[in-house]
Amino acid sequence: GFMIQAAFWFAVMALLVKLAGAQGLPTMQIVFARALVTLTLSSIALRRARIRPFGSKTRLLLLRGLYGSGGLMCFYAAVNHLPLADATVLHQISPVLTAVVAAIWLGEKLETRILLGMALAFSGVVMIAQPTSLLAESGSESDIAWPFVLVGVCGALFASLAYVAVRRLGQTEPPQLVVFYFPIVTVPISLPFAIHDWVWPDAYGWALLIGVGVATQIAQIALTNGLIREPAGRAISVGYLQVAFATIFGLVIFGTMPGLWSWLGMVMIVGSVFIARRR
């Protein structure tokens, strides 16, 4: 349930990011604003819960923030230099990597049904995104920036490391503290880039930026609660629902009617959740 909530709110966040980009706001400015809002909300949450900002595993908390920031930066770089569908598919290998990293780092079992569910979900993502550049036949002409394909893969790896770190931290640290350390690292990293390309937003732009941060905060809290309660591989596999939610938002908000392949892909993604959840 927590992971389904996280998938929904991450899809809302992506929708708001798309709308903010359409307003001419630079990517790194959006990243910085997102991190600043979540840092503010996380600080308020810590104060209200009377939680000290230094946990028992401060080094791992900082690594969690660094991994998360690295994944975010790589994903946005891939989005900026690759077709959106290609960048999306590359990032969606993170659940498989998460299961592998969790098996190595935490000793969690690589269950067959989890891997089967991931394979079904990833196939559904490919059917929805239809990344023609990545699936082009060998020798055919393509202007894809292949170095950024590697950047996209690195982003997925960073994301998987962050997810497993959250799973490990959930054993000793409260969710509010785990979430707090993501923006505390992202803010100083993104600030110089945001200042360099700063575009002053209007009232609608500010509303979008704040909305990105609020949606991210809700999603991160749900993600952390989900990872605390389930093995990392099973929990993250539910994240594929984000693609289905995004497709529905495209229909409702932008009037983009999904084709037959997209509908079949969404059915496969939803079906993969039931396969992964079976015991």
Image (tube, rainbow, N blue to C red):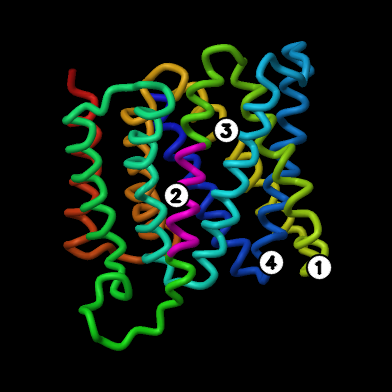
Query: Which stretch did the figure color magenta?
Result: 150-161
Kind of residue at disc 3: Ile
Q: CA distance from mark 4 to mark 2?
A: 25 Å
First in sequence: mark 3 vs mark 4 = 4
The x and y percentages for residue 58 are: 70, 23
First in sequence: mark 2 vs mark 3 = 2
Left or right, 254 with respect to 119, comes to right
Q: Residue 156 shows which numbered tag?
A: 2
For label 2, count other residues whose C-alpha is less than 10 Å away and answer few (under 14), some (14-19) or many (20+).
many
Kind of residue at disc 1: His
2 and 1 marks in contact (CB < 8 Å): no
First in sequence: mark 2 vs mark 1 = 2
First in sequence: mark 4 vs mark 2 = 4
Q: Residue 196 shows which numbered tag?
A: 1
Judged by its main secondary structure, the magenta piece is: helix
In which quarter of the view is residue 3 placed? top left
Q: Residue furthest front?
A: 104
Viewer-proximal residue, 38 or 65? Answer: 65
Q: CA distance from mark 2 to mark 3?
A: 21 Å
For label 1, count other residues whose C-alpha is less than 10 Å away and answer few (under 14), some (14-19) or many (20+).
few
The x and y percentages for residue 227 are: 45, 24
Q: Which residue is mark 3?
A: 218
Helix or strand or loop: what does disc 2 sit on?
Answer: helix
Left or right, 25 with respect to 127, comes to right
The x and y percentages for residue 275 are: 17, 31
Helix or strand or loop: what does disc 1 sit on?
Answer: helix
Kind of residue at disc 4: Leu
Q: CA distance from mark 2 to mark 1?
A: 27 Å
